[in-house]
Structure formats: C-alpha cells, structure tokens
Amino acid sequence: MALRKKMIVLVLLLLAAAACTIAGASKTKKSEKVCDKGWECKGSVYCCNQTISDFFQVYQFENLFSKRNTPIAHAVGFWDYQAFITASADYQPLGFGTTGGKQTQMQEVAAFLGHVGSKTSCKKHNRGYGVATGGPLAWGLCYNKELSPSQSYCDDTNVDYPCTPGVDYYGRGALPLYWNYNYGSIGDGIKADLLNHPENLEQNATIAFQAAIYRWMTPMKKKQPSAHDVFVGKWKPTKNDTLAKRLPGFGATMNVLYGDVICGQGYIDSMNNIVSHYQYYLDLMGVGRDISGDNLDCAEQAAFNPSYKPSLTSSSA
C-alpha cells in the first residue's frame, strides 16, 4: 500500500512538472509580444524597440542634408523629415531602423541615408564647390530627378512591364530608379502606379522615400538578399559568398544595390563616395565613424548578379 501511495505521488509530481513546462513554454512564446509605438510602428515585435523618430529627429535630418534647400540646389522645398518618417511607417514593423539595439538601428538609418545622400548630391555634378559651402558631403538630397537624361530608358522587350507610350524612365527618386521594369516592379511593391506615372517620384517626396526604402528592404533579384538583411546580419553567406568575398556589412549593401557597377573594381571614387557619406552621417548622428561595422567596402567583392542587361544603376542622377 505504501508503495502504491509513493507511485501515485510520483505520478502527480511528474504531471505537475509537465504542466509547469507547458506553462513556461507558453509564457516564453507570449513574451515574443507585438508592440505598438504610435502610427509609426504597429503590431510587430520590432516595435518593442525604439522607433526611428525616437533616435533620429528633425534637427538631425537637417544636419545631414543642410544644403538641400540652398538656391543652387535643384529640388528646393521637396525633401523633408516628415516625408521620410511617413514613408518608413510601412517598413519599421518589418525591421527598418527598428532591428536590434539602438546602435544598430542608428547605423541602419545612417547606412540607408548614406546611399540616398550620395546618389542625390549636387557635389556629384559640381565638384568646384569649396569647403566653405559645407564640404563635399553636405549636399545630399539636392536632386530628385536626372536633369539631362541621355535616353528614355525604355526596354521594349520587357513584356511584364511594357513602356507606356510617351513616358520616359530616367532617374528619379531618393535612390534613383531607371528603366520601365524597375518602375513597374517597385511600383507594384509600394502600390503606386509608377509605370504609367513615373513622375510621382519627383512630385511626392513620401513616395520617393517609399520606393527607396522598399528597394532597401526587398531582394530585387532571385537568390539575392536585401540590403537590409546583409546590413543587420540576417543574411548568412554561403561558402561561395565567402569565396567571392561577400560578407555581411555596409560593403554588401552596395553589392546588393549596384552590383558590379560599384563593386569588385577596387577603391574607385564612386564606391568611396558612398562609404564617406555613410561615415559622415554616423558622425553627425552621434554614433561615430569608428562604429561603421566590419566589411565596410566592396572593392574586392564579386557581384551577386553580374550585369548582363540594363539594371537599376546602369546610370545615375
């Protein structure tokens, strides 16, 4: 009888332990909660972190792009902080500027805007401006479109996104888009009819930033990661990637966005310019360029997808 009682007690203890384990697992699962941080970030575990406007505010945006509204700029009054924040609202729940701790979050915003600043800079076309006017890195967001297109950038062989008659697909936006198929696919991604109305990228700053953030967050080609993933460490390189010197970091974001137009050509000016903008913005945001991260350049990286036909970056504004 005593043995039977001991067996009953043992079974009850085992059942209790199992119940505690299940409850603990349930509690752990529930700890992966979704959070809301106002309209900027809703219904995502990433919203439990700070949102972009918590650590990147109007005065910092103004510091980064201090010359964008000077009389010699070509998009005076177009770009502003609120357009950037509004555009990011769809992507912060997906991890844009909300992945990891505050330092990683600030690094990603600086990295994204570093690309934007480099690609829209007046300095790119006006090398004579001296240090007295703010230096070569103070002229980001000077443009919102290519001023003197050399062609219409219509690939009439593309059946998925055929060119709209009378429409040109030259560079427009924060990360300038080129070619009808890029306007079409990214327009689908942000739910805007850019194929028929590419001018939206030069008329609406929020849409211009949305297209650029979508391009940052989304793999643009098959079997290729997004710029976001290679920067925040979500992407794990394969053996072939390692042999091709493709490793996580800012350098790989250039590989994703521009391929062999920028990467695998040594320390060329166009690559160095993008890196310089990123580091300059880190300084202005108070992070410091000494925390630029590993694998900063792509000088020796083989392209993820070698360019065999016109691409997003075959020309630039």
Image: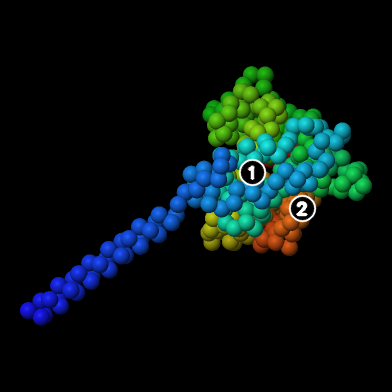
Q: Which mark is residue 284?
A: 2
Local crowd at mark 1 within 10 Å, few (<14), some, or many (≥20)? some
In this view, the mark in front (1 or 2): 2
Q: Nearer the viewer, residue 245 or 156?
A: 245
Amino acid type, callout 1? Ser
- The image's mark for residue 155 is none
Mark 1: which secondary structure?
loop
Q: Residue at x 14, y 72 (%)?
A: 8
Mark 2: which amino acid?
A: Leu
Side of 189 where 127 appears, left or right: right
**Labels 1 and 2 touching (C-beta < 8 A):** no
Residue 213 visible: yes
Q: Is residue 199 above or below residue 13?
A: above
- Residue 63 on image: x %, y %: 78, 46
Q: Residue at x 73, y 63 (%)?
A: 290
Across and down, in percent, residue 150 comes to 76, 30
Q: Residue at x 23, y 71 (%)?
A: 13
The furthest residue to the top? 165
Q: Quadrant of the N terminus?
A: bottom left
Sequence order check, earlier mark of 1 and 2: 2
Residue 62 placement, left or right of 163: right
**In this figure, which residue is indicated by the disc labeled 1?**
307
Residue 270 at least partly seen: no
Which part of the image, by quadrant, shows the C terminus?
top right
At label 2, counting other C-alpha atoms closer than 10 Å, the crowd grade (few under 14, some 14-19, many 20 or more) is some
Residues under labels 1 and 2: Cα distance? Answer: 35 Å
Position in image of residue 51 (x %, y %): 60, 48
Which residue is more in the foreground, 171 or 192? Answer: 192
Q: Is residue 31 left or right of residue 126?
A: left
